[in-house]
Amino acid sequence: QVRLVESGGGVVQPGNSLRLSCAGSGFTFRDYPLHWVRQAPGKGLEWVSMISFDGSNKHYAASVEGRFTLSRDNSRKTVYLQMESLRPDDTATYYCAREGGLGDSSGFWYFDVWGRGTLVSVTS
Amino acid sequence: DIQLTQSPSFLSASLGDRVTITCRASQGISRYLAWYQQKPGEAPKLLIYGASTLQSGVPSRFSGRGSGTDFTLTISSLQPEDFATYYCQHLNNYPYNFGPGTKINVK
């Protein structure tokens, strides 16, 4: 069964740090780019960041650039999102998503596997 | 950055209705567009990618069209499990922004 499982969420004070993890199973983890998407309570989806299959390429949304850092350990089948200088507007459920489509004959890519999310609450 | 708008934001519909949601990109994205369905308390679910390719396992009542800047998602006959929020997302270049969503509720 193909799965992504996020962990590490919790309540943190503004200015503090938190590290989220996303563990994959049921597929060849090292072959896939992975993304983080967040959703503030009652709001829409916001793309946050991406890491390539080997960790050599990363992209971040402007709202988190310079504060969030992605890394991955393919031997542990895990991606890490290190979040620094957290702000109240970082409060959200954070989803990990797999980017499928590489090697797909369609030539397109998409987020085909999602975790259930982990809730981060930044509050004093 | 490429921005996406969706219309309508809210849609009231009945079982069996044909519904269409529109997604518009601020610049051309070819067919690098995906559609997702999200129900309360759940993760998003991929419905369509490449603007018109149905993800495996998704019912054929869902269909997508468009290219460039204008896209549509159509549900041909609304079923009880289709009452949810729908998001478009472009995957043309980073950031892979999402549209603001369209919530379909029971009329």
Image (spheres, rainbow, N blue to C red):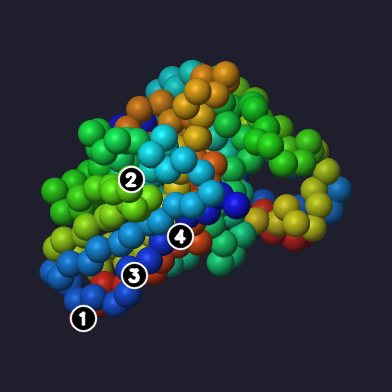
Compared to B60, does A87 lie above or below? below
Comparing labels 2 and 1, the label whose residue is closer to the camera: 2
Name which residue lies at 54% across and 35% down. Answer: B34
Between A110 and A63, the one lying in front of the other is A110
For disc 4, the marked residue is A5
For disc 2, the marked residue is A74
Comparing labels 3 and 1, the label whose residue is closer to the camera: 3
Q: Secondary structure at mark 4?
A: strand
Query: Separation of disc 3 and disc 1 at Cα?
Result: 16 Å
* Quarter of the image where one finds residue A19: bottom left
Q: Are marks 3 and 1 on the same chain?
A: yes
Name which residue lies at 33% across and 60% down. Answer: A21
Query: Separation of disc 2 and disc 3 at Cα?
Result: 21 Å
For disc 1, the marked residue is A124
Q: Are marks 2 and 1 on the same chain?
A: yes
Query: Separation of disc 3 and disc 4 at Cα?
Result: 12 Å
- Chain to which mark 2 belongs: A
Instruction: Locate the N terminus of chain B and report the quarter of the image it occupies.
Output: top left
Whether pointer 1 and pointer 4 mark residues with C-beta atoms closer than 8 Å, the reply is no
On the picture, is B51 further left or further right than B94?
right
What's under tag 1, amino acid-wise? Ser
Of pointers 2 and 4, the one earlier in the residue sequence: 4
Of pointers 2 and 3, the one earlier in the residue sequence: 3
Whether pointer 2 and pointer 1 mark residues with C-beta atoms closer than 8 Å, the reply is no
Compared to A88, does B105 lie above or below? above
For disc 3, the marked residue is A9
On the picture, is B10 further left or further right than B3?
right
Evaluate whether residue A40 shows in this view. no
Name which residue lies at 23% across and 34% down. Answer: A56
Query: Separation of disc 2 and disc 4 at Cα?
Result: 15 Å
Q: Secondary structure at mark 2?
A: loop
On the picture, is A21 further left or further right than B32?
left
